[in-house]
Image (tube, rainbow, N blue to C red):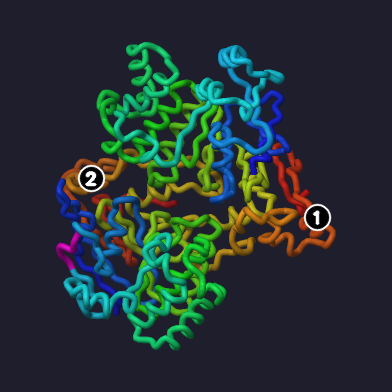
Amino acid sequence: MIEVLRFRPRRYVYAVNNVSFALREGEVFCLVGESGCGKTTTGRALLGLVKPTGGRILYRPSRELAERLGELGVVFEDGFVDLVSLGRREWRLVRREIQVVYQDPYSSLNPRFTVKRSVEEPLIIHGIGDEEWRDRRVREMLEAVRLLPVSEYLERYPHELSGGQRQRVAIARAFILNPRLVVADEPVSMLDVSIRAEILELLVSLKSRLGTTIVFITHDLATARYVCDRIAVMYLGSIVEVGDAEKVIREPLHPYTRALIAAIPEPDPANRRRMRELPIKGEVPSAVDLPRGCSFMPRCVVYDRADPRIKRLCEERRPGLARVARDHWVACWAVS
Amino acid sequence: MPLLVVEDLRIYYFTGRGVVRAVDGVSFSLEPGEVLGIAGESGCGKSTLAWGLIGLVPPPGRIVSGRIVLDGVDIVGLSEDVLRSRIRWKRISMIFQGAMNTLTPVYTVGRQMVELLRVHGGFSEREARARVLELLDSVGLERGIFDRYPHELSGGQKQRVTIAMALALDPDIVIADEPTTALDVVVQAQILNLLKRLQREKGISFILISHDLGVIAELADKVMVMYAGRVVEYGPADIVLRRPGHPYTYMLLRAFPRIHGPRGRLEYIPGAPPDLRSPPPGCRFHPRCPFRVEECSVREPSLRDLGGGHYVACIRAGELQFSV
C-alpha cells in the first residue's frame, strides 16, 4: 500500500501523488476506512515509523528546520525533502514539526510521568528553553486544552484523570512544539460520545490558531464530517475516493464509499422497521491475494450490473484516481 | 403478561476503596417478543446489569437487593448450579462483544456448538450435529465453518457463531451486550440485519445493550437510558429518540454525529460521569446539566409517568420539551 505514497508537491506543504492526496497547509485531511485499509500505516509512514517500500514522502520544512537539515547534508528538491530518505538523526529534527496524537490515551501517556512532565517532555527532548520558560509553556498549553485550573492538574498522574482529560494532555503534548503537521490517529474513538465533540473542537481550535495541518485518521465517516475539510476513503491499501468532505459524504461516487455511508446507523427509530440495504457483498478479503484489477471488484454491486466493456476493465486493470469534479477524485472504472 | 420483570435491582462492587453502586435501583419489564434497548455510556451500569440478569456479576460485585422475575420465578439467589443447568443458555442466553467470552480457541466451531447442545440441552451427538448445521444456515454461515477453528474466522463470522450459540437452545430471552462494537461498520450493519431478521422470524425477546444510540435504533421497540447506575428515561423508541424528556438523553442525541441531513453543530456534555463510590446528592446528572434548577442538587428524582409508557426521572419532567 505504501506505493501510493508518491508525493508530488507544488504549493502544498506535502502531498501524495499518483493522484492520491495533496495536503494543503492548515487543513484537516481525513483518512477514513475500515480496519486493515491502511489508514494507520499511512499515518505511521508520515511519522517515519514505518519505512515505505516504494514511493516518496515529500515535505517542505520550515526555514529553520531546512537550514539545520542542510547542515546535515540533506538534499532538497524545490524546497522539499523526501522523508523516506532521512536517517534517524534527521528524523529527530523533523519530529519537531510532525507530531502525533494516538487513539488510546491510556497507553500513550507514561503512567509514571506527571501531567507536567508528559507535556514538557518534547521540549526537553529537543532541548528547548530553560526550566522557567518550559514551565510557563506547559501552563500555557494546559490552559489551551482547558485543563483548568492548571495548578490542579500539573502534578497529577494519568490514572487520576478521565479518558477525556488524558486525551487533552496528549493534545497539549503534541502541540507544545508548535508542529506544522499533527497526525491524529482515531483521537476520540475510545472516548464516550458525550465528550467527543469537546475534544474535536479543541483540536480544531488549536489548529486554527496555530495554522497546523492535521491528518485525521478515523473509521467513522460521520465524525470525519464534523472536523475535516477533505476526506480520503481508503480500501485495501488504496485511496478510492478523495475530495471536499461535504461533497464526498453527500454525493459519494465510489461504490465502496456509498456502502460505508449506507452502513452507518443513526438514532432514527424508523430504522427498525426496515432491513438496512447494503450495496456491498461479503467481507473485506485478506490483503495478501488482491485481485489483479480493482481490489474492490469482488464486493462491488456496480460491477455486477456493469456492461461487459467496463467489467473487463474492472477485472484487468487497477483504476487510478480520476478527477470527476472540482476537488473530487474517484478510482472506479464505472464512474470515470 | 411480561416475560421478565426486574424490580429495584441493586448491584454493588465492594472494592478496597469503597462501595461502587454500579446498578442502583433499576426496574423494568420485558414483554414477549419485545426488543428493549439499554443505552448509556461507560460506567453507567448497563453491562453490570446484563451480567446481573444471568447471575454472572464478577467479584467483588454482587446483587445487593431487588428481584429478577423470569416467567413468575425470582431468579435472584438461585445457586450457581441451578443457574447453569436451568437458566443460562436455555432460558436466558447472551451475546457478548467480540465473541471473546464465548468461543474457545482450542476447539473447532462445530465441536463447541455440539458440546453446548449436549451439555445444556441433553442432545445426542447426532442430534446435536444436525442442529448445529441448521443453526449455521440460519445465521448465514457456510456449513464448512463446522470444522474451522475460531482464529480462522473473520470478526463477522465469529459473531455469527456466537449468535447461533445464543439461539441454540431456543431461549426465552437473548441479551446482546455491545454485539457489534468490535466490528467494522459494514459488518456491523450485516450483523444488525441478521439480528433483525432472526428477531422477526422467531419472535425473540431481546435485551440489546449499547453505547451507540444508532445501534439501539436499529432494533429496539423500547429504549431505556441509564446514567450513573440509574434509569433516567424509559419508553417507546419513537418517543425517547425523537422527543426525549430527559436532558441527558437529549444531549446524548445532540452529541451523535450525523451522516445524513444538515451537518449542524456537534454538542457535547461538559464534565464527566460521577464516581459511583460517592455520587453527587440529588440528581446524579445535575452537575453536567445545563437545564438544572436549584432543587436538582437536593432532591433525587424518581421515574415519572408522562403517559404513553414514557417515564422520565427529572425534576423538570414534563416541563422540558425536547425534539431531535
Q: Which mark is residue B275?
A: 2
Please report, as a chain letter, where disc 1 is located: A
Residue B37's place in the image compared with A105, above or below, is: below
Q: Which mark is residue A313?
A: 1
Q: Which mark is residue A89?
A: none
Residue type pointed to by label 2: Asp
Residue type pointed to by label 1: Leu
Q: Position of residue B2 (x, y in %)?
A: 29, 76
Secondary structure beneath dot 1 equals: helix
Residue positioned 81% across, 58% down in the render: A312
- Asked whether residue B239 is in view, the answer is no
Residue positioned 68% across, 35% down in the render: A55
Q: Where are the magenta residues, as a range?
A: B61-66
Q: From mark 1 to mark 2, how far is it between C-alphas? A: 59 Å
Q: Position of residue A257 (x, y in %)?
A: 63, 51
On-image quarter of the N terminus of chain A? top right
